[in-house]
Structure formats: structure tokens, C-alpha cells
């Protein structure tokens, strides 16, 4: 009757069915040889009623003042929920002692802007607001403060499990129709509440929410993440590294609830370390309302495609490519992000084509060279041979920033739609160019400028249906001219996967995220 009993008996190639219900124990796959085995399937109830929680229900609370209750606790919890609603953590530490340990290995990171966890709420039991909790390491107990004189009839769940599912060195493993909530990962370590490493892992119809750190951490080759949702996690929705992945119909939303530094690791998804993600395809990916970047590739990710995706209303950048090469970014909707829509830093040989980039708070698209070079000499970080073609760039604070030196980076066949200010163009961070000088620099000779009432960034509203806010785009397509034959021919040769046809207009012709 337990997951542990099933895992003790599990052999590669088995099919484990976990019946509907709430389980407060992890899926820990045994360490054994998986080489050459058939696919192993661990599957929940088809109606989505199999829920694995990393919290325990604590009932032994003692009153400690109006609305205050304490319970003994043998570990520091990173999450407490009352009637399924999260309480605010007061004080607390993460990653085995940060920020209290002066010698902590992460102590110096981003020290000038709050460290890696600027969202941490300092305080003690005297300063606790209503709907918060505090762990006292000396007393070994947790205090909660809630707007109630009694906890009778209320359910209090305290995070306990470091991992909700874990496997290392597995091959051909599938997790399907499973939901996961709550975890205590960050108390001592990093990574995902669900953390899997191996080859040919398939995640299908999996929901992970309200984990204390990252929802899903995945490493290895030839993985698939299909029709899954990672939301409201404390740091990021998805993270990992590897090659040959397929990510299709995945949503990451409302992540970084605990306020980790967005310049470190926080937001929707981040692929970083050991070359990041390579030779992979991300299709119909939805990254919205994250407290950080929507989708971030950092440090030597190569040869990935991001297509037909929605990157919207994130507090950072929509798409962030940093020290990367060889990306194809096509037919995406990048709208309403508070910072840049698409941002390439120290990135080369990438193609941004047929995207709608609108209403972002800074640049619609920015490609910059800030002089950083690879200290290992493994990759050329100079910014070369990026193409910006066939995009609709509309109503951003700044339309487009190209790198300085411009080198062989190209922009052409785009449509710029906005007022004069929102159509601003620059080379480097400081050199602003008028349209004529821009074209004389060899940029956008075949592009089009339209004065359309598409509004400024402030008009993009997360509370309103996206289709209504972008209705101007569909209505304007008949006014848009086709991309010139020269840029189209060059694109067809550079990116055969696009299957570019004659007469193609700027922006996505067909999108999952816009009315047909």
C-alpha cells in the first residue's frame, strides 16, 4: 500500500500504477543497472487524482498568544501551508546556512543587490505578521501566526521531504499522470523537488506546484517533457542540462514566489552549467507571470530551437540567451515582459525570425557585446552573425538594439509598428540612430515602418485576455507587405527547418496563442 514498497520491488521495464489519493512519501528509484531494459512507467490515476506531497500534517500545536501557535520540529521547514494557502516565511536559511554563514560558498554572489535571496523577509517572532511562520533553531520549534483563535477544523501542512521523486543513472523511465506539491529541498541543497538524471526520461502530464525551490530538475540526454505544468515554485519552474531534448506543450508560470535574485537563478526556466542544453527543441512553451525571466539559456547552450511559444508578462526578460550559439527562435509571441522581450548577450550565429515582440518594458529585441570573453577559450563570446528577420516589433520602450561593433550581424525584412519613441533604434547601449542613419549602417533596408495605434508597454495588462490585447496584430496583417525576396531567400538557405515560402509576411502567420 506504499510507494516505498513498490520501489523496493521495482525492476527495469515494470509498469507501476499509483492509485488515486494523497501520498506523503517520495518516489525514490533504486540504484541499479538500467542499461538495455525496456521502458519503465510510473503512472498515476488518469483523471489526475494521484498527488504526492512533501509535507506532513502537523496537529500538535500549542497556543502561544492570540493567533499564534507553536509545534516542535526536528528540521527547518521552508514551507508551511494552512488550508492549502502558503504562509510567509520570516527569517530562515537556505542551502545549508545561507545567509547566516559568512563562509557560505554563495555569500559573495550578487552581494551588491541583495545577494541570491533578496526576497528573504528578515525578522523574528515579535515582528511576525499575520499569515506567516518562523523556525527557531535553538528552541527547535515552528511558530505560525494566523487570523484564528483555534486551529480546530484547519489543516496545517509543514514541508519535510527534500525530494518528491529522485533517480540517478536511469534509462527509459516515464513519469505520467502525477501531481507533486510541497518540498523542503532548499533547506540543505539545490535542484528540483523532482530531480531526475539519466537518459531517455519522459515526463508526461505531470503537474508540480508550490515546491520551495525548483519544480523539476532534469539532467541527461534524449529527454521528453510533454503536456506538463510547473507553477508557483519558490525559485524556478524548470532547470537542467543535457542534449537532444523535446519540450512540447509545457507551462511554467508564477514561479520564484520566494524572491530569489532574478540575475542569479529565478523565474520560469533556466538551463545552465556544463554546456547547458544543446540540440533540443522547445515547442508551444508557455512562460508567463514568472518573477524573473520567462526562459533563460546561460553559458554555452548550443543549437536549440524555440518555436510557437508564448513568453509573456514576466518581470524580467521574455527570452534570455547568454553566452550561447546557434539558436533558431521563430514564430513566438513575446509580449508584456517588464524588461526586454528577447535579449542576446555574448551570443552568436542565432536567428530570430517571424516573432511578434510587443509591449515590452525595455527593448523589444536587444543583441549586445559587452566585451566578455570565455576564460577557458572553449567558445567565442564575441557577438557575430546573428540575424533579426521577418519580425513584428511593436510598442516596446525601444524597438531594437544591435551590437557594437555591428560586425556581420544583420537585421532586415522586419516590421516596426509604433510611435516614434517606441520605434527607437540603437547600436550598442548608447548610440541612438534615426531611421535614415540606421539604414545607411546596412540595417533594415527592406523593412517597413507603420504608425499603428498599438500603444506602449503600460497598455499590456496581465489581467486582460491576451487575444484582445493583440487583436491589432491580426487586423493589421493585411496591411503588411511581404518580406522582400532577398531576405527570404537568405533565410531559406540559413534555416531550412522554417520552410519559408514566397510572400511570407513578418510575424507569426499561425500561432497557438492567437486567434486563427
Image (cartoon, rainbow, N blue to C red):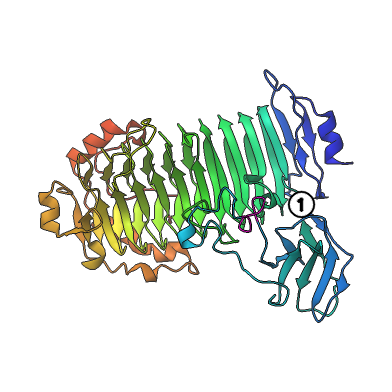
Extent of the magenta region: 94-101
Question: Which of 89/499 is in front?
Answer: 89
Left or right, 260 with respect to 182, comes to left
Q: Secondary structure at mark 1?
A: strand
Q: Residue at x 24, y 43 (%)?
A: 503
- Residue furthest to the top in view is 36
Task: Say whether residue 98 is magenta.
Answer: yes
Image mark count: 1
The quadrant holding residue 145 is bottom right
Residue 369 pos. (x, y %):
28, 46
Residue 111 pos. (x, y %):
49, 58
Left or right, 290 with respect to 172, comes to left
Measured along the vertical axis of the image, is residue 100 above or below residue 321? below
Left or right, 296 with respect to 255, comes to left
Say whether residue 16 is visible: yes
Q: Main secondary structure of the magenta part?
A: loop
Say whether residue 418 is visible: no
How crowded is the residue under tag 1: few (<14 C-alpha within 10 Å), some, or many (20+)? Answer: many
Residue 154 pos. (x, y %):
83, 70
Q: Residue at x 81, y 48 (%)?
A: 20
- The residue under label 1 is 53
Which quadrant would the N terminus be assigned to in this image? top right
Task: Say whether residue 503 is magenta.
Answer: no
Q: Residue at x 37, y 62 (%)?
A: 360
Left or right, 413 with respect to 359, comes to left
Residue 307 pos. (x, y %):
42, 43
Question: Which of 385/212 is in front?
Answer: 212
Amino acid at each position: 500500500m506504499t510507494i516505498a514498497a513498490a520501489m523496493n520491488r521495482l525492476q527495469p521495464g515494470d509498469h507501476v500504477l499509483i492509485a488515486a489519493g494523497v501520498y506523503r512519501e517520495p518516489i525514490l528509484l533504486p540504484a541499479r543497472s538500467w542499461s538495455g531494459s525496456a521502458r519503465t512507467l510510473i503512472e498515476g490515476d488518469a483523471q489526475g487524482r494521484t498527488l504526492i506531497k512533501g509535507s506532513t500534517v502537523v496537529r500538535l500545536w500549542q497556543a502561544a498568544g492570540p493567533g499564534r501557535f507553536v509545534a516542535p520540529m526536528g528540521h527547518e521547514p521552508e514551507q508551511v501551508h494552512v488550508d492549502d494557502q502558503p504562509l510567509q516565511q520570516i527569517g530562515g536559511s537556505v542551502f545549508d546556512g545561507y545567509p547566516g554563514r559568512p563562509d557560505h560558498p554563495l555569500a559573495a554572489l550578487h552581494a551588491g543587490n541583495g545577494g541570491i535571496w533578496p526576497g528573504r523577509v528578515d525578522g523574528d517572532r515579535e515582528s511576525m505578521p499575520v499569515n506567516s511562520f518562523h523556525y527557531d533553531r535553538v528552541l527547535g520549534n515552528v511558530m505560525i501566526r494566523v487570523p484564528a483563535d483555534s486551529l480546530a477544523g484547519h489543516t496545517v501542512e509543514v514541508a519535510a521531504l527534500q525530494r518528491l521523486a529522485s533517480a540517478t543513472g536511469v534509462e527509459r523511465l516515464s513519469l505520467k499522470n502525477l501531481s507533486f506539491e510541497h518540498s523542503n529541498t532548499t533547506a540543505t541543497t539545490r535542484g528540483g523537488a523532482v530531480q531526475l538524471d539519466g537518459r531517455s526520461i519522459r515526463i508526461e502530464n505531470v503537474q508540480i506546484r508550490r515546491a520551495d525551490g525548483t519544480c523539476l530538475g532534469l539532467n541527461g540526454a534524449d529527454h521528453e517533457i510533454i503536456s506538463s505544468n510547473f507553477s508557483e515554485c519558490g525559485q524556478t519552474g524548470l532547470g537542467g542540462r543535457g542534449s537532444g531534448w523535446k519540450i512540447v506543450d509545457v507551462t511554467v508560470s508564477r514561479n520564484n514566489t520566494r524572491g530569489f535574485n532574478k540575475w542569479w537563478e529565478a523565474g520560469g526556466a533556466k538551463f545552465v552549467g556544463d554546456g547547458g542544453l544543446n540540440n533540443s527543441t522547445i515547442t508551444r512553451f508557455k512562460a508567463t507571470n514568472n518573477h524573473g525571466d520567462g526562459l533563460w539559456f546561460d553559458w554555452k547552450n548550443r543549437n536549440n530551437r524555440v518555436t510557437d511559444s508564448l513568453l509573456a508578462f514576466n518581470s524580467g526578460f521574455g527570452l534570455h540567451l547568454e553566452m550561447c550559439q546557434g539558436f533558431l527562435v521563430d514564430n513566438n509571441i513575446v509580449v508584456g515582459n517588464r524588461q526586454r522581450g528577447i535579449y542576446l548577450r555574448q551570443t552568436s550565429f542565432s536567428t530570430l525570425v517571424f516573432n511578434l515582440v510587443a509591449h515590452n518594458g525595455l527593448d523589444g529585441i536587444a543583441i549586445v557585446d559587452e566585451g566578455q570573453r570565455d576564460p577557458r577559450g572553449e567558445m567565442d563570446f564575441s557577438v557575430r552573425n546573428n540575424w533579426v528577420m521577418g519580425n513584428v516589433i511593436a510598442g516596446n520602450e525601444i524597438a531594437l538594439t544591435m551590437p557594437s561593433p555591428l560586425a556581420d550581424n544583420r537585421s532586415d525584412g522586419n516590421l516596426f509598428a509604433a510611435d516614434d519613441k517606441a520605434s527607437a533604434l540603437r547600436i550598442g547601449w548608447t548610440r541612438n540612430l534615426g531611421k535614415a542613419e540606421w539604414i545607411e549602417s546596412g540595417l533594415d533596408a527592406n523593412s517597413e515602418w507603420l504608425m499603428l495605434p498599438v500603444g506602449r508597454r503600460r497598455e499590456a495588462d496581465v489581467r486582460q485576455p491576451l487575444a484582445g490585447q493583440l487583436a491589432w496584430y491580426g487586423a493589421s496583417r493585411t496591411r503588411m507587405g511581404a518580406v522582400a525576396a532577398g531576405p527570404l531567400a537568405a533565410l531559406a538557405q540559413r534555416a531550412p527547418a522554417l520552410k519559408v515560402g514566397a510572400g511570407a509576411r513578418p510575424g507569426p502567420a499561425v500561432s497557438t496563442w492567437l486567434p486563427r
